[in-house]
Image (tube, rainbow, N blue to C red):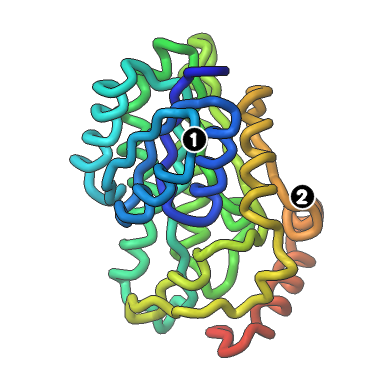
Amino acid sequence: MTNKVVIITGASSGIGKALAEKYASEGWNLVLGARRIERLKELENQLKNVEVLPVKTDVTKEEDCKFLIESAIRKFGRIDVLINNAGISMRASIEDVEVEVLRKLMDVNYWGTVYCTKFALPHLLQNKGSLVGVISVGGYIGLPGRTGYSASKFAVRGFLDTIRIEYLKSGLHVLVAAPGFTASEIRLTALTSDGSQQGETPRNENKMMSADKCARIIFRAVKHRRRKIIITFWDGKVVVLIAKLWAWIIDQLIYSVFSKEPDSPLK
């Protein structure tokens, strides 16, 4: 895999940053996209023995996504893997949340994936590369208080599953990766009912899977060209399996868990 090129969105923190570090350790050249360019440049300075191209990218803007892909081609002349990782969450009841917050979730999580995929696809097809979407267990089951988040992740899963079928005979690899609770900044930056960031996590981050471990699992799944992975066990594989068999049990369980969070939006 040496000298191949991976593009990672949302690379300034969390799973995206961990993925950048993992791919760099394996000798890949990197194109990193995020709004916080200063963080990307700090990461560039930390990564050794590979070429890194940081690109300031707001994935809600079609032109930014196009520029990200074009920058990768100008710099390296190829794209082997695109990892659509950029995402935000929310925490508010559907009754209280402003519609603009729901729109923002879809703009970042879904449309950001659509834009980057659309522009990268010809280059991925040329190299029989990998198209990856980092979703969530919330893309398989509804998470109360996070309607916009779950809806956007369901949408990404449907989008990528359809692309996989469209290009079944082309050699394109499509992976949908669904972590459960993973320690990252996503809960700190989650939007409240009025669109402000909640600034703190309602959950114990120490008990969650680390972003580094999550990145290693995704890296292996790309390497082995897996179709889908649900990464965590109890809050991932087990929950999704039970939801397929006994959906009403998972409804009750998820409600119970989320209603016990500090300042839960559930009433």
Name the kind of residue labelled 2 in the image. Answer: Lys
Please tell me how many numbered marks the rendered image carries.
2
Residue 209 locus on image (x, y percent): 71, 58
Q: Distance between the residues labelled 2 and 1?
A: 35 Å
In the rendered image, is residue 59 in sight?
yes
The residue carrying pointer 2 sits among few (fewer than 14), some (14 to 19) or many (20 or more) residues within 10 Å by Cα, namely some
Q: In which quarter of the image is the C terminus?
A: bottom right
- What residue is shown at x 49% (from left), y 35% (from top)? 48
Horizontal side of 68 relative to 255 (left or right) equals: left
Identify the residue position indicated by label 2 in the image: 237
Horizontal side of 114 relative to 227 (left or right) equals: left
In the rendered image, is residue 107 in sight?
no
Element type where label 1 sits in the image: loop
Residue 2 locus on image (x, y percent): 54, 18
Identify the residue position indicated by label 1 in the image: 48
Q: Earlier in the sequence, mark 2 or mark 1?
A: 1
- What residue is shown at x 51% (from left), y 79% (from top)? 200
The residue carrying pointer 1 sits among few (fewer than 14), some (14 to 19) or many (20 or more) residues within 10 Å by Cα, namely few
- What residue is shown at x 74% (from left), y 73% (from top)? 252
Horizontal side of 60 relative to 193 (left or right) equals: left
**Frontmost residue, 198 versus 247:** 198
Name the kind of residue labelled 1 in the image. Answer: Lys
